[in-house]
Amino acid sequence: MDVAVIGGGPAGLAAAWRLVRAGARVRVYERREVVGGGLRTDVLDGVRVDPVVQLLGSHYRATVRLAEEVGARGLIVRAPGRDALWRGGRAHPITYGSVGSMIVSGALPLRLKLRLARDYVPFLQRHRKVLDANRPVRTAEAGLDRESIAEWGRREVGEEFSELLAYPLLAAYHGAAPEEVAAGFYHALAREGLGVTVYGVTGGVGELSAAVVRALEGAGAELRTGSGVQALDVTGDGVVVRWPGGETRHDAAVVAVPASVARELAGLPAPAAEWLAGTRSAPTATLALLLDRPVDADFFGLSFTRREPPGDRLAAVCVEERKGAGLVPEGKGLLVCYPAPAVAERLAEAPPAEVLDFLMPAVERAFPGLRANVVRAKAYRLPEGIAVFYPGYAGHLARFDPGWLGRRLALAGSYLVSPTVEGAVRSGEAAAERLLRAA
C-alpha cells in the first residue's frame, strides 16, 4: 500500500508512523521547509526556542507512546509546573490544577476559592464520565456543549470564574476567549488539569518531531518539504496528489493539515468540504525575546487577565529557562510572549516589527527595564491558528462521517479530537487505522 500524507505536523507524523509500522510505503508532503507544525523548535543566536507548543501533559498518552516507539521517551522531562497570574499589578504564584495551590495563592479572591471548593470541583467529579478532552462528543450528549464557558461560569460560579480562571487558561493555551469556547470543552480541560503533571522536551519540542522523522526515514518513508499540495484527484484505483509543477499517484492519502487549509484543498468530497466549513480557528503570533541575562522570576508561565494592563495586549509570557528542558545557556534569558486573543488575529498578519513594537511595552510593564537586556527578537506568525471548540462544536463533530471520504481518503488534525498535540497525534493514528482497515 502506497500512501501520501499531506502535512508534516504532529497529526501527519503520527499517521505516517502508524502506516509505516503496518508495512505501507509513505511519502509525507509538507509545504514548509521544516516539519513539525506547532511541535517545532527554532534556533535564535544559538538559543533554542519553542515558539508555539511549550509543554506536554501527563494525559498525553498517545504522544508519549509515539515518543517511546521512536526511541525518544528519554527526551520528555518533568517541568517544575510553577506558574503565576498577574493581578493587582503584580505576579502571584499559582500551580494550575493543584487545588491546594489555588486555595493558598493570592491570585484568586477568597470568594472564588470557596466556590471552587464547594461547587466546581464536585461538579467536575459528578460529570467525570463525560469530561474527556479527547472525546468532546460526550459533552454534547450530556448537554454541556450548548453555551460558552463564559455564560456558564457567570451563572454558576460568578464573573471571577470566567476572568481569573477560564480566560488565562484559554487565552494562553488555545488563543481564545471564554465567550468563544464551549463550556463542556473547558470542563474537560479543567478535569484533566486537576491531576496533571507537565513535561518539557529536552532541547525543545522540535526534538520529538525530529525523532519521528529519523524513525520514518529509517523505515524507508520519504519526506518532501516545500511541497504545497493544492489538489487531490480520487480515481477508482488511487489518489493523484497535485502540487505546483508536479503530481504523483498513490493508493490512498491522509489529509493532515489545519482545517482552514483543508477547506482550500481541491478534490475533497463535497460533504466533507461542507463540514469543514463549520470549523473555526484562532490565528495568532508569538514573540521570542533573547536576553543577555536570566529573567528574575521563579515561575515558568505568567498569565494575564484582560481586566488590567498588560492583559489588554498579552495573554501570557513563558520564561524558557524555567522550563527545565535545557533550552537556554547559562547567563542568558529567553521569553516567549503570546498576545491576547483580542489582538492576536491582527498580529498574525502584521509585519514582525509591528508585533515587536506592539507587545514590547506590555512585556516591560510586567518586567520593568527589560528592553535594555533584549539582544535579539523574532516574531512567529501563525495565520492558520488553533482550532476553536466553540459552543455547539462537539455536536458538529458528532455529525462528521468518515464515510464521506470513501476508502482512499482520511482526514487528520487536532480539530477532529482536541486542539492539542495529543489531539493531533490521536487523529493521525485514527486516520491511518481507517485506511489500513479499508485496504
Image (cartoon, helix red, strand yellow):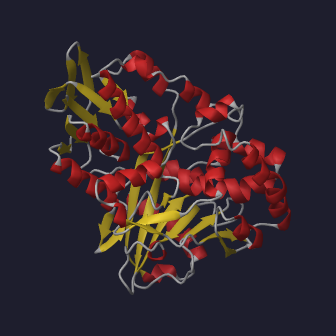
Task: Answer left or right for 271 relative to 210.
Answer: right
Check the image and report above or below for 19 versus 312. Answer: above
Q: In which quarter of the image is residue 269?
A: top left
> Can see residue 311?
yes
Q: In which quarter of the image is residue 23?
A: top left
In the rendered image, which quarter contains the N terminus? top left
In the rendered image, which quarter contains the C terminus? top left
Nearer to me, 357 or 419: 419
What's the residue at 30%, 68% (across, down)?
43
Image coords of residue 89 (percent x, y): 70, 74
Query: Total of numbered circles in the picture?
Result: 0
Image coords of residue 377 (percent x, y): 38, 70
Check the image and report above or below for 275 versus 311. Answer: above
Image coords of residue 279 (percent x, y): 51, 32
Nearer to me, 188 or 375: 188
Check the image and report above or below for 287 versus 89. Answer: above
What's the residue at 55%, 75% (across, down)?
364
Q: In which quarter of the image is residue 398?
A: top right
Task: Answer left or right for 9 relative to 102.
Answer: left
> For the view shown, which residue lies furthest in the top direction?
236
What's the residue at 30%, 28% (across, down)?
436
Check the image and report above or below for 286 versus 37. Answer: below
Image coords of residue 154 (percent x, y): 80, 47
Task: Answer left or right for 164 relative to 133.
Answer: right
Nearer to me, 364 or 213: 213
> Can see residue 34?
no
